[in-house]
Image: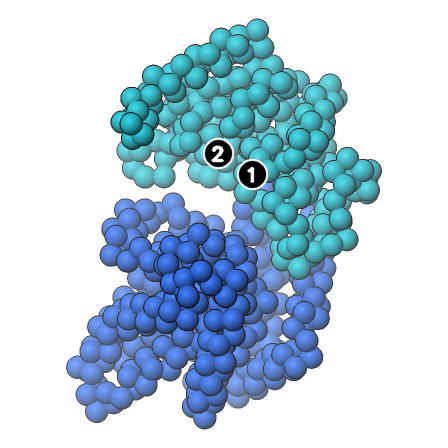
Chain colours: A cyan, B blue
């Protein structure tokens, strides 16, 4: 179980991007994190992974402070060294099943990464992450830039990873990609988890979210366009 | 960890090989020539006790700049279990020409200074972006919006620029302080032009290739000169008899600056980086440092200006 207790992160004094956040993530489940731009999703991921300093609070995995030994993280924007091939990139992660994984994503692994499209780079980064065997997998916007086939393959992989006993935390701007695979969705607003919903409540969550967005913006859109 | 360290070094080696391959024999020879000149200069400088510390400090400053600006920090933190040895090894390899020269001259204390300095730099875990928002936001408002390379570059390097500028001002009564500050600021600003913008940003000028390039060069030159002007004036106040030094430095740096811009657009690719042009940029910097080569720099700028105009025709021909 992952327990986030009283997590606070701020980049400037007095402005908390993550504000006393509490969240419990049950083992062996797929969890979605949603929220509008600037809600703090990426900051939350960075704080869980330990990429940024926490002002307060702690993240526990099975009652122990979480470490990089237990978690892999795919950030939204991935870095690739220039002038190296996909295969060379993947060799950094020390897995010998590169070609088996690539039968799913069909990347030209012996080509220089600089020539890859955005979607291909995303697939490559995903392959690097997914082949690491750690109990917690955290993916920030994994579906961004992927084509329909790869999105579906990724969903299948995520479900299989869950069956294999992994705990997954995923963020996405595409609600349907989360509702298809997640068991829980946590809605983040102003650095706090405003509410969490389980699979049975996803329809209600979508309705609530969209009506909230409509209420907040319809008038402004009318003013701008009419 | 050793496995990943080995892999990273292997990748670096492959990157070097491929850069050499892509550059072609002529440019590679140029680069090797430049490297040999730099190593000979290091060897000569480190022969005297007086110059070996400044030489080591220059190397360390270079490593510090690389460390603060490297883009793979998060990648290493995320994917490499012990990432600091990667920095250490890379920086020791980078400073190996200096270390070898120092060892050959028997300057063991300076060796220790350089090694400890490199190791300390590799331990720095500081992200400028988290600590500069308020000042940066104010400074951003002073930069015209059409100079977006400056906006991006200043946002990334503000603290470094302010630090060097401030040091230059504070130490301006030393003869070398302001020219050195001008050169370092110039080097930082050269980096603003290493990434290419989107097509939409170019289209926003609503000008044909030649007019757009002239406009950009004029705007960049103006802002660059404006930034350096206080330093030049300060130098003239403290060292009136040497008034021409900062003026020459400004002209040379401005020439390199214009050369960089022409290179950028001569090889412009939408949204691309221009990493392969790094060597051409380096050649420009070296030309700028050797007085007799400066006319060649101007000739090259003219050549690349024409090449840039041709290269931009498919993107901007509608405005001609």
Task: Name the secondary structure under disc 2.
Answer: helix
Q: Is residue B45 above or below residue A122?
A: below
In the depicted structure, whether residue A183 falls above or below residue A119: above
Q: Are marks 1 and 2 on the same chain?
A: yes
Q: Please rate how many residues cluster around mark 2, counting C-alpha atoms within 10 Å: few if below 14, some from 14 to 19, many from 20.
A: some
Q: Can I make out residue A152 in this image? A: yes
The C terminus of chain A appears in which quarter of the rendering?
top left
Q: Which of the 4 image quarters holds residue A224?
A: top left
Identify which residue is drawn at 82% across, 42% down. A99
Ranked by sequence position, the earlier of labels 1 and 2 is: 2
Closer to us: A178 or A91: A178
**Which residue corresponds to the image point at 38% horizontal and 45% vertical from the top-left?**
B130
Q: Which mark is residue A126?
A: none
Q: Position of residue B170 (x, y in %)?
A: 24, 70
Q: Would you name the residue on which mark 2 appears?
A: A42
Determine which of the numbered discs, if any, sits on residue A75 in the image.
1
């Amino acid at each position: 179980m992952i327990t986030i207790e009283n997590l606070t992160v701020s980049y400037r004094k007095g402005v908390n991007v993550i504000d006393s956040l509490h969240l419990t993530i049950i083992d062996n489940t797929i969890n979605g994190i949603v929220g509008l731009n600037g809600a703090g999703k990426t900051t939350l991921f960075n704080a869980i992974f330990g990429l940024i300093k926490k002002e307060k609070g702690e993240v526990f995995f099975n009652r122990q402070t979480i470490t990089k030994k237990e978690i892999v993280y795919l950030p939204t924007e991935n870095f690739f060294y220039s002038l190296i091939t996909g295969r060379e990139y993947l060799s950094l992660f020390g897995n010998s099943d590169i070609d088996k994984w690539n039968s799913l994503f069909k990347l030209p692994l012996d080509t220089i990464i600089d020539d890859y499209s955005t979607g291909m780079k995303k697939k490559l980064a995903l392959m690097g992450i997914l082949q690491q065997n750690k109990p917690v997998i955290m993916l920030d916007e994994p579906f961004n830039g992927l084509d329909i086939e790869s999105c579906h393959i990724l969903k299948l992989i995520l479900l299989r990873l869950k069956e294999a006993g992994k705990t997954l935390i995923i963020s996405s701007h595409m609600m349907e990609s989360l509702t298809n695979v997640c068991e829980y969705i946590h809605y983040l607003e102003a650095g706090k988890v405003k509410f969490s919903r389980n699979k049975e409540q996803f329809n209600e969550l979508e309705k609530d979210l969209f009506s909230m967005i409509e209420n907040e913006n319809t008038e402004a859109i009318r003013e701008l366009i009419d | 960890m050793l496995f990943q360290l080995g892999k990273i070094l292997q990748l670096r080696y492959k990157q070097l090989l491929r850069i050499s391959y892509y550059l072609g024999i002529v440019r590679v020879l140029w680069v090797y020539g430049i490297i040999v000149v730099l190593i000979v200069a290091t060897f000569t400088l480190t022969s005297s006790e007086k110059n070996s510390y400044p030489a080591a400090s220059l190397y360390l400053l270079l490593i510090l700049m690389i460390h603060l600006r490297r883009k793979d920090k998060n990648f290493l933190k995320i994917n490499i279990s012990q990432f600091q040895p990667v920095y250490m090894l890379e920086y020791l390899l980078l400073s190996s020409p200096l270390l070898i020269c120092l060892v050959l001259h028997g300057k063991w204390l300076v060796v220790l200074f350089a090694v400890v300095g490199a190791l300390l730099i590799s331990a720095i875990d500081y992200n400028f972006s988290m600590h500069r928002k308020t000042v940066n936001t104010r400074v951003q408002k002073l930069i015209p919006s059409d100079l977006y390379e400056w906006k991006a570059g200043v946002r990334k390097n503000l603290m470094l620029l302010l630090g060097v500028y401030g040091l230059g001002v504070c130490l301006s009564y030393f003869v070398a302080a302001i020219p050195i500050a001008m050169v370092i600021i110039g080097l930082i600003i050269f980096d603003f032009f290493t990434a290419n913008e989107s097509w939409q940003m170019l289209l926003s000028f609503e000008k044909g290739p030649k007019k757009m390039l002239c406009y950009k060069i004029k705007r960049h030159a103006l802002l660059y000169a404006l930034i350096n002007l206080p330093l030049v004036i300060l130098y003239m106040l403290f060292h009136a008899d040497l008034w021409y030094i900062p003026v020459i430095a400004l002209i040379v740096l401005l020439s390199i600056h214009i050369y960089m811009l022409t290179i950028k657009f001569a090889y412009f690719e939408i949204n691309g980086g221009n990493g392969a042009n790094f060597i051409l940029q380096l050649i420009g910097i070296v030309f700028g440092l050797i007085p007799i080569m400066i006319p060649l720099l101007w000739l090259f700028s003219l050549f690349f200006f024409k090449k840039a105009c041709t290269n931009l025709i498919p993107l901007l021909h509608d405005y001609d």
